[in-house]
């Protein structure tokens, strides 16, 4: 019975992910590739690059609420929550490595090479957008890790209470 209940909760997370993807990106997010037109550039993204992280985020939130409301008693829910949390941290790490590929090396030469004479050396300037995005990802990873540590602590205290009785 517990396995069926967990499968229903996972199906609820999948359905919520699909509804959110359709709401945010339209029906094209479920079929083939997603085309995002930004100024004069097209970004073509596979639907799995969109749906997998979105599912991990929604599943983490749904199971955090579920585990918190149940008082950390259901072991299978706790394990699914922990697995989705660690998977989300890994996915964010991979995302942090992929983001610089959207920019040209993450650095800007100033002044441009064409404006330099033979005796001048260009200055390398960091792209501030990449630094900001990397900082946001680290903050999200830290928050997720704090929530996981809090949940494991509460799960352990709940087990200790149950074993003492």
Image (cartoon, rainbow, N blue to C red):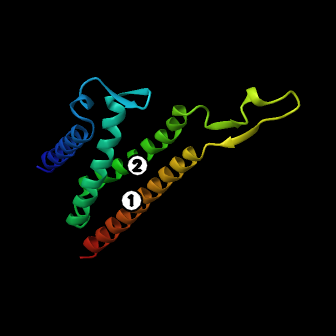
In the image, is residue 79 above or below residue 90?
A: below
The residue located at (33%, 71%) in the rendering is 157
* Disc 1 residue crowd, few under 14, some 14–19, many 20+, Cα 10 Å: some
Foreground residue among 112 and 80: 112
Find residue 97 and report its horizontal and vertical position in percent. 53, 38
Foreground residue among 121 and 88: 121
Find residue 5 and report its horizontal and vertical position in percent. 14, 49
Label number found at residue 86: 2
Q: Residue furthest left?
A: 1
Q: Residue furthest bottom?
A: 165
Dividing the picture into quarters, in which one does residue 16 lie?
A: top left
The residue located at (28%, 23%) in the rendering is 32
Find residue 29 and report its horizontal and vertical position in percent. 27, 31
Find residue 85 and report its horizontal and vertical position in percent. 37, 51
Q: Secondary structure at mark 2?
A: helix
Label tally? 2
The residue located at (32%, 65%) in the rendering is 155
Foreground residue among 162 and 69: 69
108 relative position to 2: left or right:
right
76 relative position to 95: left or right:
left
In the image, is residue 23 above or below residue 112?
A: below
User: Circle 1 is placed at which residue position?
Assistant: 148
Which image quadrant: the C terminus? bottom left
In the image, is residue 27 above or below residue 147?
A: above
Dividing the picture into quarters, in which one does residue 125 lie?
A: top right
Q: Secondary structure at mark 1?
A: helix
Circles 1 and 2 in contact, beta carbons < 8 Å: yes
Label number found at residue 137: none
Q: Who comes first in sequence, dot 1 or dot 2?
A: 2
Foreground residue among 21 and 56: 21
In the image, is residue 159 above or below residue 45?
A: below
């Amino acid at each position: 019975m517990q396995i069926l209940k967990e499968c229903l909760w996972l199906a609820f997370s999948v359905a919520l992910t699909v509804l959110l993807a359709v709401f945010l990106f339209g029906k094209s997010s479920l079929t083939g590739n997603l085309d995002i037109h930004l100024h004069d550039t097209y970004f073509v993204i596979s639907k799995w690059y969109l749906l997998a992280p979105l599912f991990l985020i929604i599943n983490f939130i749904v199971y955090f609420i579920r585990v918190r409301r149940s008082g950390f008693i259901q072991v299978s829910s706790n394990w699914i929550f922990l697995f989705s949390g660690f998977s989300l941290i890994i996915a964010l790490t991979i995302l942090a490595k992929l983001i610089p590929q959207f920019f040209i090396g993450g650095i800007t030469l100033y002044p441009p090479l064409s404006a330099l004479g033979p005796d001048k050396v260009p200055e390398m300037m960091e792209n501030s957008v990449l630094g900001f995005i990397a900082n946001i990802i680290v903050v999200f990873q830290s928050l997720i890790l704090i929530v996981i540590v809090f949940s494991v602590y509460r799960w352990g205290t709940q087990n200790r209470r149950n074993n003492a009785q």
